[in-house]
Amino acid sequence: MRLETGDTLLQPREHSSLVPPLKQGLLFVLSAPSGTGKDTVIKALKDQGMGFHVVASVTTRAPRVGESEGNPYYFVSNETFERMVENDELLEYANVHGNWYGQPIQPIKENLRNGRDVLLKIDVQGAATVRRKVPGAIFIFLVPGSLEELVYRLTNRQTETEEQVQRRLTDARKELAQQIHYDYIVENRQGHLDKAVERVRSIIIAEHCRTNPHYVEL
């Protein structure tokens, strides 16, 4: 089809700059103090059909009751973890609560290239490393309704000793101070999970609606 207006001839261009490029996935980072409900929020989002890929971290800690290989971690020895670090197989790694955790880089690359969002569930140390290495990532921080609420959650889930609970609470105070470095803060108050889930979902949708989405290169 050709449109003529006076001396000007207008016709469609084969490669218009308005045609969006081939989409790739977005990289999201979710951090929160232990016991704030990261896994619960992620599961609720997945149940709603959110198709992001959650990278299973590798860790040197022992599995808890109900955990299995790849769910939610890959459990490795200290020697294997050290080898992965030496071979640059981890995007980031950090010692958290006395154990090593890391994010394998290969599944992150593959999913992003295939157009699938990737969500990294990592602590503030790991997030700081990703922020430095991948500035285009989108950072979300989940906070409890109060510190008292966090004490209640950690105590009642009965997966740690009293000493471990106290250590996690000490770490939580330090982690909460880092929320200013994140793009979004989402409160997960006791009894209001649906609100937290909806807010995280809205963030993901909004990031895809940007005129210039935050695509990253790894």
Image: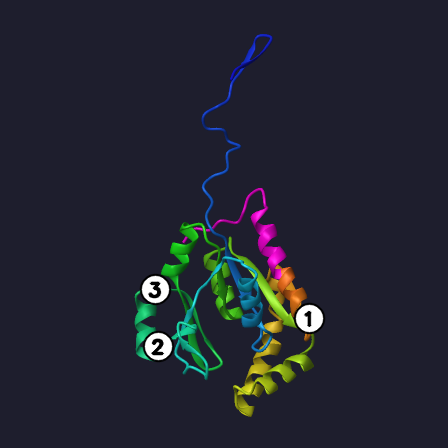
Give the structural element (helix, strand or loop) at label 1: loop
Looking at the rendering, the stretch of residues picked out in magenta corresponds to 200-218
Q: Earlier in the sequence, mark 1 or mark 3?
A: 3
Q: Is residue 93 left or right of residue 78?
A: right
Distance from Cα at disc 1 to Cα at disc 3? 38 Å
**Mark seen at residue 89:** 3
Mark 1: few, some, or many residues within 10 Å (few <14, many ≥20)? Answer: few
For badge 2, the amino acid type reads Val
Which is more toward the observer, 79 or 118? 118
User: Who's the residue at 66% across and 66% down the image?
Assistant: 194
User: Who's the residue at 42% across and 70% down the image?
Assistant: 57
Number of the front mark, 3 or 2? 2
Which is more toward the observer, 186 or 127? 186
- State the residue position of label 1: 192
Residue 130: x, y in percent? 48, 61
- State the residue position of label 2: 76
Distance from Cα at disc 1 to Cα at disc 2? 36 Å
Residue 122: x, y in percent? 50, 69
